[in-house]
């Protein structure tokens, strides 16, 4: 029987592990499909306090894990494939095989990349369609690519891709950008970036080559449609919370985000949330770390009160 099981190993889960381990609770962290969470897929993080020159995302998250392990946190690779929260101790199944029992649970399972949902896009994932410039940018050396989205991720991915691609087109469905001014301005100064606004991708072409050769675009204001040649299509259109295993057990909003019951409490006593699985507003590494800390402290108090 565990005192604390933490689902997810991003900034939120790892910080919860640091706090729970330092409270002598010997937490078990179930790492999830994307070990290290979204930080492991990013490049330079410039806004995490304490790093005046910035720090690479994978290094930051690896450091927090190392810190948690130093205090006795245990990490298990694999995904939480089922959970029974109907009574305590809670039961969490890892990779459909092993089931662990725990007195408290911290859900820090984060959110995964959103896709456009086009059949042609889904067919070409890994063949020119990607949601991770850091992972796949290298393959597009000297070739034209498109990034879809108007937020910070689109600016970051677009700017990053100019290191490899011959040119990068940022395609956004509106003419106003959600991205922060600093990241938008940086992308705008980059001469390798072209811009298409009020434009959506309607189809991804592969010309029977099973790799991206272009896209069909539509201007949402004029209705005009045209074909555009690119070899890579990067989606940077936000994320979907990883809460499938909690459906029907925890109160979720219509998009699947956990509904907070104050602090990091969920609708089930003894189950706490941390990071992007609940947070649709801030979604920063530092806020994820903050809620990870809060969830561990709340779990510790819950264990004391229910000893
Ligand atoms: P986001 O801010 O939610 O932006 C998503 C973008 O995708 C929006 O421009 C949205 O358009 C567009 N979009 C959504 N669904 C779409 C669809 N079906 N078709 C076409 N376009 C679609 O997501 P994000 O850029 O991933 O950023 C998430 C959070 O992480 C933010 O808080 C951001 O500041 C943070 N972040 C920070 C950094 C950094 O500081 N280094 C880097 C990356 C992300 P609309 O604008 O029209 O809704």
Image (cartoon, helix red, strand yellow):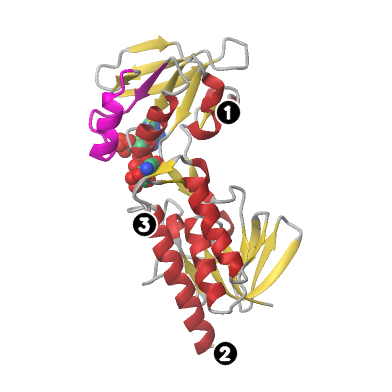
Which image quadrant is residue 96 in? bottom right
**Residue sitting nearer the eye, 6 or 164:** 164
x then y, percent, for residue 305? 50, 89
Q: Which mark is residue 50?
A: 3
Can you tell which of label 3 and label 2 is closer to the viewer?
Answer: 3
Look at the image and give the residue range highlighted in magenta. Answer: 167-191
Residue 76 falls left or right of residue 299: right
Residue 225 appears in the rendering: yes
**Residue sitting nearer the eye, 12 or 69:** 69
Label 1 and label 2: CA atoms lie apart by: 49 Å
x then y, percent, for residue 159? 38, 28
The tag earlier along the polypeptide, 1 or 3, is 3
Residue 186 falls left or right of residue 247: left
Q: Residues within 10 Å of mark 3 (few under 14, many from 20)?
A: few
**Residue sitting nearer the eye, 237 or 30:** 30
Can you tell which of label 1 and label 3 is closer to the viewer?
Answer: 3
SS category of the residue bearing label 3: loop
Q: From the Cβ of disc 1, is ligand 1 less than 8 Å away?
A: no
Which quarter shows the N terminus? bottom right
Q: Residue at x 58, y 79 (%)?
A: 24
**Quarter holding ligand 1:** top left
x then y, percent, for residue 237? 40, 36
Question: In the image, is residue 22 part of the stretch drawn in magenta?
Answer: no
SS category of the residue bearing label 1: loop
Q: Residue at x 47, y 83 (%)?
A: 301
Residue with the mark numbered 2? 307
Residue with the mark numbered 1? 125
């Amino acid at each position: 029987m565990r005192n604390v099981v933490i689902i997810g190993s991003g900034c939120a889960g790892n910080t919860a592990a640091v706090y729970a381990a330092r409270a002598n609770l010997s937490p078990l962290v179930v790492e999830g499909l994307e070990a290290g969470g979204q930080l492991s897929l990013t490049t330079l993080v410039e806004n995490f306090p304490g790093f005046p020159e910035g720090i690479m995302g994978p290094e930051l998250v690896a450091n927090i894990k190392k810190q948690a392990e130093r205090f006795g946190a245990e990490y298990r690779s694999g995904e939480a494939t089922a959970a029974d929260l109907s009574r305590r101790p809670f039961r969490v199944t890892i990779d459909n095989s092993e089931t662990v029992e725990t007195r408290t649970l911290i859900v820090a399972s984060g959110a995964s990349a959103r896709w456009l949902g086009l059949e042609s896009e889904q067919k070409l994932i890994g063949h020119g369609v990607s949601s991770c410039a850091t992972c796949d940018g290298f393959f597009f050396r000297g070739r034209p690519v498109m990034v879809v989205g108007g937020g910070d991720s689109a600016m970051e991915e677009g700017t990053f891709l100019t290191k490899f691609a011959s040119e990068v087109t940022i395609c956004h469905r509106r003419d106003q950008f959600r991205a922060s001014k600093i990241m938008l301005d940086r992308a705008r100064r980059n001469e390798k970036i072209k811009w298409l606004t009020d434009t959506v991708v309607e189809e991804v072409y592969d010309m029977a080559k099973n790799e991206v050769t272009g896209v069909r675009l539509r201007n949402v204001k004029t209705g005009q449609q045209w074909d555009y040649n690119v070899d890579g299509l990067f989606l940077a259109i936000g994320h979907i919370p990883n809460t499938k295993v909690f459906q029907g057990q925890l109160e979720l909003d219509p998009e699947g985000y956990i509904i907070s019951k104050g602090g990091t409490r969920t609708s089930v006593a003894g189950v706490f949330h941390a990071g992007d699985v609940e947070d649709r507003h801030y979604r920063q590494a530092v806020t994820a770390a903050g809620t990870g800390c809060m969830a561990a402290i709340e779990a510790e108090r819950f264990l004391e009160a229910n000893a």
